[in-house]
């Protein structure tokens, strides 16, 4: 991997305003494809108590028929012109997206508009999608990973939406009504707080014409006020009994928000310590040296204007105690001494050299622009990111390691039949 971003790499971003809407645009006519991504704050945070999974269910149903088209007709209309339209809800956001060849763009816009304004919620579609969601919720609790993840978030953020199961439970999904989803839709899908990004073979003038067509029918609305992420509740080690040959570990502690001055240094540090590659310290110590796991990873998960440092691994039940000992020792060692200069150089080389891979298709670019808007990034944030990463010194990374990695606060949930605790 090259140590620098290729000379001349940039992603020019235009700001397009029309009809009261604002979009960021990365224009590229090399392929006749256009992608749009848009979103609001909210998502599962707006789920009523006892109806967890409502936002997720709503996101699945918006494309199951709209206007005069039932689910089959809507799917056929999109498939006939190779149009991709989708919606998604996570813990604190609700997103939409479309992707279409240039000749099919007007039809794609019309289908997306109908999905957001006149979804049908036909009985057959609701029953089918609900059954699928319930099956998924039950399946998630059959294995150790789903059980561990649910218990981890509930223990870390009791009484906060971050601690609730965003995809719901079988019981909560069964309790969701069509009237409830229509009410949720009114609180979620409107002009207030809407963020839009676009990429591909579309000019600023064409996008200016498109924005009111796609979003002009949305009602006025007020962005929801979401509760800020509270401090992580350190809970030590908890065990969720699951009959399985392996135990799944979900571990973590307090993170730092994306606007924090230490954010870039934390990215370098975590690439060294717990990044996805085989060169990370955790992978080397647990997999390469001891064969304790096939993989281990940890990173910052941003939500509710804060973040959580969270990671996962799986290991044989008989070796859980050994794995925890190594994990805690490596956590303390990095917190005490920080990364070496060689590790820093390798991490920065990877992070800067791999940056262009984020922009290999219009969907990824539109999604990146939307994330930048959500995180309050300036227009030149991507262009200047390699420079910021190279400016991170070893001393800075060591200070961040001491701040971020707090061994006594490291908390974990173990789902399985662990031994050696």
Image (cartoon, rainbow, N blue to C red):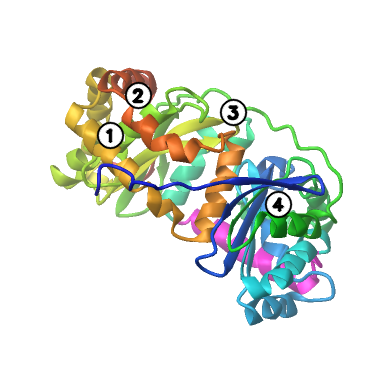
The residue at which mark 1 appears reads as: 273
Range of residues picked out in magenta: 119-142
Viewer-nearest residue: 72 or 328: 72
Answer few, some or many: residues within 10 Å of disc 4's Cα (few below 14, many 20 plus, some between 14 and 19): many
> Which of pointers 4 and 2 lies earlier in the amino acid sequence?
4
Q: Secondary structure at mark 4?
A: helix
Q: Give me the disc on residue 405.
A: 2
Q: Which mark is residue 54?
A: 4
- State yes or no: discs 2 and 1 in contact (Cβ < 8 Å): yes
Main secondary structure of the magenta stretch: helix
Marked residue nearer the N-terminal end (2 or 1) = 1
Q: Earlier in the sequence, mark 1 or mark 3?
A: 3
User: Nearer the observer, disc 1 or disc 4?
Assistant: 1
Of the numbered discs 1 and 4, the one sitting upstream in the chain is: 4
Res. 187 visible in picture: yes
Work out how far the residue at label 4 is from the one at label 2, CA to CA, in angstroms. Answer: 35 Å
Mark 3 lies on residue: 229
């Amino acid at each position: 991997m090259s140590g620098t971003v290729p000379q001349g790499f940039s992603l020019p971003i235009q700001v397009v305003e029309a009809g009261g809407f604002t979009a960021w645009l990365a224009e590229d006519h090399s392929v006749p494809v256009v992608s749009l991504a848009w979103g609001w704050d909210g998502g599962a945070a707006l789920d009523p108590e006892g109806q967890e999974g409502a936002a997720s269910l709503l996101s699945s149903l918006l494309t199951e028929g709209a206007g005069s088209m039932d689910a089959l007709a809507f799917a056929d209309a999109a498939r006939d012109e190779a149009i991709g339209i989708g919606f998604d809800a996570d813990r604190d956001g609700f997103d939409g997206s479309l992707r279409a060849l240039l000749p099919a763009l007007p039809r794609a816009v019309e289908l997306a508009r109908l999905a957001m304004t006149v979804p049908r919620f036909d009985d057959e579609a609701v029953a089918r999608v609900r059954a699928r969601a319930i099956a998924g919720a039950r399946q998630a609790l059959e294995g150790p990973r789903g059980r561990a993840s649910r218990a981890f978030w509930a223990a870390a953020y009791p009484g906060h939406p971050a601690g609730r199961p965003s995809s719901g439970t079988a019981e909560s999904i069964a309790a969701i009504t069509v009237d409830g989803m229509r009410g949720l839709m009114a609180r979620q899908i409107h002009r207030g707080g809407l963020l839009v990004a676009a990429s591909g073979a579309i000019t600023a003038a064409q996008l200016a014409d498109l924005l009111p067509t796609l979003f002009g029918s949305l009602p006025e609305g007020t962005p929801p006020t979401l509760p800020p992420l509270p401090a992580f509740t350190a809970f030590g080690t908890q065990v969720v009994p699951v009959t399985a040959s392996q135990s799944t570990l979900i571990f973590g502690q307090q993170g730092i928000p994306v606007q924090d001055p230490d954010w870039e240094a934390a990215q370098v540090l975590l690439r060294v310590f717990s990044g996805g590659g085989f060169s990370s310290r955790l992978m080397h110590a647990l997999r390469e040296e001891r064969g304790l796991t096939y993989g281990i990873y940890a990173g910052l998960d941003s939500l509710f204007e804060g973040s959580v440092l969270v990671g996962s691994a799986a290991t044989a039940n008989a070796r859980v105690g050994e794995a925890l000992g190594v994990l805690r020792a490596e956590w303390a060692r990095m917190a005490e001494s920080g990364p070496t200069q060689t590790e820093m150089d390798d991490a920065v080389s990877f992070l800067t050299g791999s940056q262009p891979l984020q922009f290999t298709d219009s969907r990824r670019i539109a999604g990146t622009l939307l994330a930048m808007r959500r995180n309050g990034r300036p227009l030149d944030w991507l262009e200047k990111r390699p420079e910021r990463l190279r400016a991170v010194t070893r001393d800075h990374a060591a200070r961040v390691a001491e701040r971020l990695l707090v061994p006594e606060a490291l908390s974990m949930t173990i789902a399985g039949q662990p031994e050696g605790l």
